[in-house]
Amino acid sequence: MLDVRSSYPNCSLKRVANRSLTNDSELQEHLRKFRAAAASLPSKGLWKRRKVDSVGDTGPIVGTNTSLEKPFLRTTGALASMVRPRHTCIKAFEHLKRKWEADKDYKFIWEQYKSLRQDLRVQSIEDH
C-alpha cells in the first residue's frame, strides 16, 4: 500500500481516513486529485506579505490643501489637492491639541489624527 505520509508529510490524513478508501486504485485517484489541486496553488513565496510603498513609483507628492481639519478618507491614490503640506500639518497638529484641550471629543480627534498621519505618510514626511 502507498504511504501517504512519505509523499505529503505535512498534510492531514483525516479526509483520507474518513472516506474509507478500500483499495489502492481509490487511494491513487485521491492522491492524483490532491496533487493536481496542490500544483495549482501559488508557491509559498507568493503568500508572504510584501511591504508596499504607499507613495508608488512616482515618488512622494507635495500637498496643496490648507485646511486644518479634514476627514480621514481611505484612498488608494492621493491627489495633491487632498493632502496637506508639511507646514499645514504642523499648524493642524497645534490646532488639534488646542481642540482636544477645549472639547475632549475623542472620536473627532482620533479621525483627525488618522487624517494627519495619512497626509504625512503619502508625502514621506518623517521628523524625528
Image (spheres, rainbow, N blue to C red):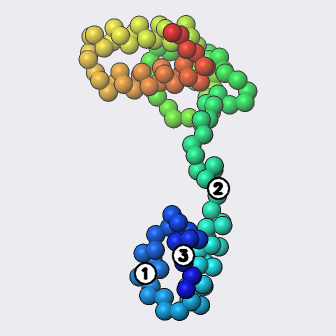
Kind of residue indicated by mark 2: Ser
User: Where does residue 60 sit, x and y in percent of width and height?
Assistant: 66, 21
Residue 51 visible from this viewpoint? yes
Residue with the mark numbered 2: 43
Look at the picture and state if 88 lies above or below 9: above
Of 39 and 53, the residue lying toward us: 39
Image quadrant in which the N terminus is located: bottom right
User: Where does residue 92 sit, x and y in percent of width and height?
Assistant: 45, 11
* Residue at 57 percent of width and 89 percent of height: 24
Residue with the mark numbered 1: 17
Q: Quadrant of residue 112?
A: top left
Kind of residue indicated by mark 3: Val
* Residue at 48 percent of width and 20 percent of height: 116
| Category of crowding for the residue at label 3, using alpha-carbon neighbours closer than 10 angstroms: few (below 14), some (14–19), many (at least 20) | some
Task: Label 3: state its secondary structure.
Answer: helix
User: Image check: 37 left or right of 10?
Assistant: right
* Residue at 53 percent of width and 10 percent of height: 127
